[in-house]
Image (cartoon, rainbow, N blue to C red):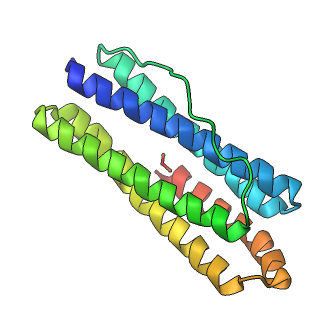
Amino acid sequence: MLSKKIEKALNDQIRVEAESSQIYLAMACWAEVKGLEGVAGFMYSQSDEEREHMLKLVKFVNERGGHAHISELKAPNVTFKSFKEMFETLFEHEVFVSESINNLVHISLEEKDYATHNFLQWYVAEQIEEEAMARTILDKINMIGNDKGGLYLFDRDIEQITVSTAASDTLE
Ligand code: FEO
């Protein structure tokens, strides 16, 4: 059984994951209208992953005697000054999500809720991967700068990052 405090904290995280899904969906749309199919595909798949993160929490809360609350979401940014700015936003957002997960882990220990603590370890590991991936992408974008040819190649190659992420997900 979840304590009220844990239930509230998990529900807050459900909203964070749902908002993440919307943020990446908006990024996918922006990339798509700008003609970068690879980046758009990557962002669509990130958006799907965030929805999975949310659903996993929803099921956990409901199965443990709580009630997952589906709430109103903050509207994401729909335009960006540049791809660099968009990927910076993605990286900063993942750092924010990691802090949010860390806070949740902290509360689970305070509440001596070891089942929730155990459940959250998947998210801890996932955040390490997501931050690392966002950092790698940002490094590449910084190298490219304003070079159009570089951006073309990046758009082609980013699909590989999606494929390798999908492959590691299947192995889990
Ligand atoms: Fe579900 Fe990218 O954090």
Left or right of 46: which side holds 13? Answer: left
Left or right of 168: which side holds 43? Answer: right
Task: Tell me which residue sits at (38%, 31%) in the image.
Answer: 12
Image quarter of residue 119: top left
Q: How many marks?
A: 0
Task: Tell me which residue sits at (74%, 73%) in the image.
Answer: 157
* Residue 113, position as x, y percentages in the image: 16, 31
Task: Tell me which residue sits at (29%, 23%) in the image.
Answer: 7
Image quarter of residue 156: bottom right
Left or right of 129: which side holds 27? Answer: right
Task: Pick the residue in front: 52 or 131.
Answer: 131
Instruction: Determine whether 171 is above or below 88 in the image.
Output: above
* Residue 155, position as x, y percentages in the image: 78, 70
Instruction: Determine whether 19 is above or below 147 in the image.
Output: above
Task: Pick the residue in front: 8 or 61.
Answer: 8
Instruction: Determine whether 135 is above or below 75 in the image.
Output: below
The answer to whether any part of residue 126 appears in the image is no
Task: Tell me which residue sits at (72%, 67%) in the image.
Answer: 83
The answer to whether any part of residue 156 appears in the image is yes
Residue furthest out toward the front: 81
* Residue 114, position as x, y percentages in the image: 16, 35
Task: Pick the residue in front: 60 or 40.
Answer: 40
Q: Quadrant of the N terminus?
A: top left
Instruction: Determine whether 35 is above or below 22 in the image.
Output: below
* Residue 43, position as x, y percentages in the image: 69, 53
